[in-house]
Amino acid sequence: MIRVMLIDDHPVVRAGLRAILDSFEDVTVVAEASSGAGISAENTKNIDVVVSDIQMPEVDGISLTRTLVESGGPPVLILTTYDTQADIVAAVEAGAMGYLLKDAPEQALHDAVVATSKGQRTLAPEVSTALMQRVAQPQQALSSREIEILQELASGATNKALAAKLFISQATVKTHLVHIYSKLGVSNRTEAITKAREQRLI
């Protein structure tokens, strides 16, 4: 029996997912949480797979994944509605074993949980496509830091605020922006944000 910890900040969604997971003969949900806060390898020793959303209060799914991977905790299967390249790359780099979208068929969810419990990577078709596009055009692919900067720009951050938050100089921020503009084929931050959203980078 595969023991699952389910983490999602929406109670109704969590209840629905629990009902689906518990309907599988070889899967059982043994723990739930509304965020990754306080979850570590130490208190997940009886867990085989952590199924987690990305955007959550306090500690998000990416940070939780990184914590569990670094501390030798159970493997993480990301189950979310977010399919931007920024989220996908962040999750994979953090060490998530799987990345599935919430509109996936129940059988796909079951297969992903089983694969994750065995240490096998599972990616939704849309996720695989996004990663393949990134690999196919490496010279145009934005780095994780560049995507992070774009996300901050989209929220209205100034160069000064960006530098302070990322612990880099304003000159470094400007250098990153030059690279971002070049890769996206734009000339200013407004165009960069628009194009990044069109390409689902953020």
Image (spheres, helix red, strand yellow):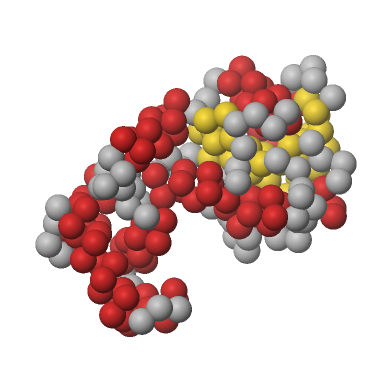
Of residues 68 and 23, which is closer to you in this image? Answer: 68
Q: Residue 112 at x, y = what percent?
A: 63, 26
How many numbered dots are placed on residues in this image?
A: 0
Q: Residue furthest front?
A: 139
Q: Is residue 169 left or right of residue 11?
A: left
Q: Residue 143 at x, y = what percent?
A: 37, 55
Q: Is residue 185 left or right of residue 198?
A: left
- Residue at image location 63% in from the left, 63% down from the top: 58
Q: Residue 78 at x, y = what percent?
A: 59, 40
- Residue at image location 20% in from the left, 52% down from the top: 184
Q: Is residue 30 left or right of residue 57?
A: right
- Residue at image location 29% in from the left, 67% down from the top: 176
Q: Is residue 8 left or right of residue 43?
A: left
Of residues 115 and 61, which is closer to you in this image? Answer: 115
Q: Is residue 140 above or below residue 173?
A: above
Of residues 79 and 14, which is closer to you in this image? Answer: 79
Q: Is residue 117 above or below residue 92?
A: above
Give the image quarter of residue 198: top left
**Residue 171 in view here:** yes
- Residue at image location 70% in from the left, 60% down from the top: 37
Give the image quarter of residue 39: bottom right
Q: Residue furthest right?
A: 46
Q: Residue 54 at x, y = what percent?
A: 55, 49
The N terminus appears in which quarter of the rendering? top right
**Residue 34 in view here:** no
Q: Residue furthest left?
A: 187
